Image: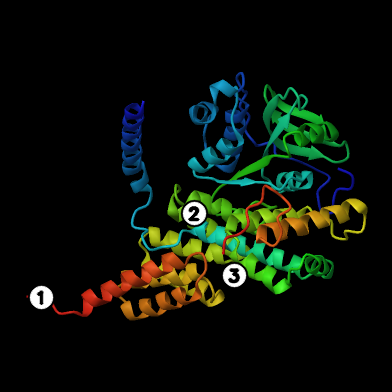
Amino acid sequence: MESPPEYLPRHAELVEVPYFAQEAYQCGPASLAMSLSAAGISVTPDILKPELYVPELHGSLQVEMLAVTRRQGAIAYQLAPELEDVLREIAAGTPVIVLQNLALGLYPVWHYAVAIGYDLDNAEIILRSGPEQRQELPMKTFEYTWARSGYWAMVAMLPGKIPETAEEYSYIAAVSSLEKIGDPKNVQRSYIAALKRWPHNLSAQLGVGNTAYRLHDLAQAETAFRQAAQDHPDSVAALNNLAQTLADQARYEEALDSARRAVSLDGPLAKTAQATLADIEVKVREHTSLPAH
Amino acid sequence: MKQQYSRFMRWTSRLVMLSMLTMGLPLQPAFAGMVETDQAISHELANQDRAKINAFLDREDVLSQLQQHGVSAADAKARVYALTDDEAHKLAGKLDQLPAGGTDIIGALLFVFIVLLITDILGFTHVFPFTHPVKK
């Protein structure tokens, strides 16, 4: 790096990151197992191999690395393509999975490794890489091989923890990808952590409400959606979900009010809002009309 | 041949139905009527993209370029509102490649390219064959 920022420590090394020696072509499972284990999810490359390794390719795809991380219950966050961000994550205690192309563009040799340390004075990066438990690589060489992968790098975080270099929308989007498959309680911890850092983020507020709704905690869901609707009065999603949550509690008058406001806002979610309003109107009629017999 | 095809389709559709029944349902318990978080995020991002495009359309050099092509800023903005989320994202991505100053020759060419791309997508011009004008 030409001029590393002042606040970055001159060197750092995460010696406690476990090492799994890789078998042939198994750099994906090995790297991910090291990263997940360091985060506190104990797995071995053998556990990950069936989900991750594509025999025809002799390797693992980047999207699968992210997806399998989620299936293990962790947040998969892809870093911005900056060497500085990789070093900042390491300095903050998080090992970084990097994709390198060890050969040239025409005849690529793809390789995943885990960056666990660096030394700015010696211009070196330290990797757990393939058969080497501690590979010291000149920073320049690393940058060349990493550049050829399009600077692909990711971290695996336990829910509730936010990567040092996390960008607001990328991180919250990463959390939301875990919402439909992960434990809602864990996912909610991540949304709450995100709200501590970015207090008024609409998506994180909705995420807290939606995970509470999945957990059938309608009171918490209502509080979250109310907050979202108050901070973002033009959010159809906040009003729609508030209306649905109120209707589920048979509080139809309040539900109708929110649903009508959602419908009045128009926008790409208009159809959902209209359907919610129609649904509540039906329930109101059922509720108020006298039994037929 | 036709019959083979329809038999194939029949089995495929059965397979698809079965996989939807067995896999789709358990993932989505009682979430009817709710807007999913990821859905809300993509709309929010698209709104940011639209804001970025509108800010671009407010630039003086852009305004004069638009006028040269017979487009009023108000018209252009009305069309930006009608872009799909995906289109807004693609367009905003192009804007990110634009140099801030636009004084050098490459910058100027790229600048004109972006302006024309925008007017194309908005349906005011048709310079690039690969663009699909926004339907109103």
Q: Quadrant of the C terminus of chain A?
A: bottom left
Q: Amino acid at mark 1?
A: Ala
Distance CA(mark 2)–CA(mark 1): 46 Å
Give residue A132's position: percent from left, percent from top.
Answer: 70, 24
Q: Residue at x 77, y 56 (%)?
A: B114
Give residue A66's position: percent from left, percent from top.
Answer: 57, 40
Q: Residue at x 57, y 29 (%)?
A: A29
Asked whether the residues under marks 2 and 1 belong to the same chain, the reply is yes
Q: Which residue is mark 2?
A: A187
Q: Tell me the chain of label 2.
A: A
Give residue B53's position: percent from left, percent from top.
Answer: 71, 64
Q: Which residue is mark 1?
A: A292
Q: Which residue is mark 3?
A: A200
Q: Nearer the viewer, residue A145 or B111?
A: B111
Counting labels gives: 3
Q: Amino acid at mark 3?
A: His
Q: Amino acid at mark 2?
A: Val
Q: Secondary structure at mark 3?
A: loop
Say if residue A217 shows up in the picture. yes
A80 up-or-down from A29: above or below: below
Whichever of callouts 2 and 3 sits on the residue coming sooner in the sequence is 2
The colour mode here is rainbow
Q: Residues within 10 Å of mark 1 (few under 14, many from 20)?
A: few
